[in-house]
Image (cartoon, rainbow, N blue to C red):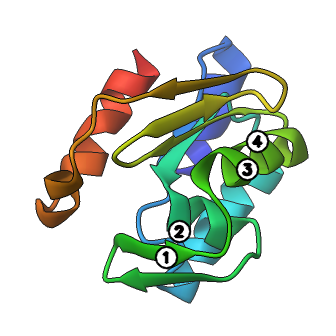
Amino acid sequence: MLTAGRRANERGIPVVVDPVGADAARLGTNSARRLLRELSIAIVHGNVAEIAGLAGREAKTGGVESVSVADNAANVASQFALQHGCVTAVTGPIDAVTDGKRLTRVANGHPMMSTVTGMGCMATPLVAA
């Protein structure tokens, strides 16, 4: 990941990170934090618990699915975007996309999406595009 990210940075190709399960497992959290530290990241995309977990905030998950976070997705996304200088897309029933200054909410999700494994992962290429 680091090699690909560095090469993309050298070539001016935007890097998109989807920290799958970052809040649920230390390895995933530490790996995603290392990418944020060592690369220029254009977009971080994940559910609210993944983004909150990366930010060091408390979140509860069920596997890789977000169960609860003490704050709403828009606040978590905005604070994370400002902290890391990247666009942050938090997906859920209502997505929050922000650079920390501007915020867009996209209400095209469905509560059942969290019951289908891989729905969030499939959104990452769309976010990248």
Mark with earlier residue (2, 1): 2
What is the spatial separation of the Cα atoms under label 1 and label 3, in whole angstroms? 14 Å
- Check contact, mark 3 vs mark 4: CB within 8 A: yes
What is the spatial separation of the Cα atoms under label 2 and label 1, in whole angstroms? 7 Å
Q: Quarter of the image holding residue 65?
A: bottom left
Element on which disc 3 rests:
helix
Q: Position of residue 29 (x, y in %)?
A: 60, 74
The residue that mark 2 highlights is: 49
* Crowding near the residue tagged with mark 4, few <14, some 14–19, many ≥20 C-alpha atoms within 10 Å: many
- Check contact, mark 1 vs mark 4: CB within 8 A: no
The residue that mark 4 highlights is: 78
| Amino acid residing under circle 4 | Ser
| Amino acid residing under circle 1 | Ser
From where the camera sits, is residue 4 visible? no
Q: In the rendered image of this protein, does residue 63 appear above or below residue 82?
A: below
Q: In the rendered image of this protein, does residue 104 appear above or below residue 3?
A: above
Which residue is at a point 41% across and 40% down the rendered structure image? Answer: 94
Mark with earlier residue (2, 4): 2
From where the camera sits, is residue 104 visible? yes
Element on which disc 2 rests:
helix
- Check contact, mark 2 vs mark 1: CB within 8 A: yes
Relative placement, left or right, of 2 versus 105 is right
| Amino acid residing under circle 3 | Asn
* Crowding near the residue tagged with mark 2, few <14, some 14–19, many ≥20 C-alpha atoms within 10 Å: many
Q: Position of residue 28 (x, y in %)?
A: 52, 74
What number is the disc on residue 75?
3
What is the spatial separation of the Cα atoms under label 1 and label 4, in whole angstroms? 18 Å
Relative placement, left or right, of 56 versus 48 is right
Q: Position of residue 69 (x, y in %)?
A: 58, 73
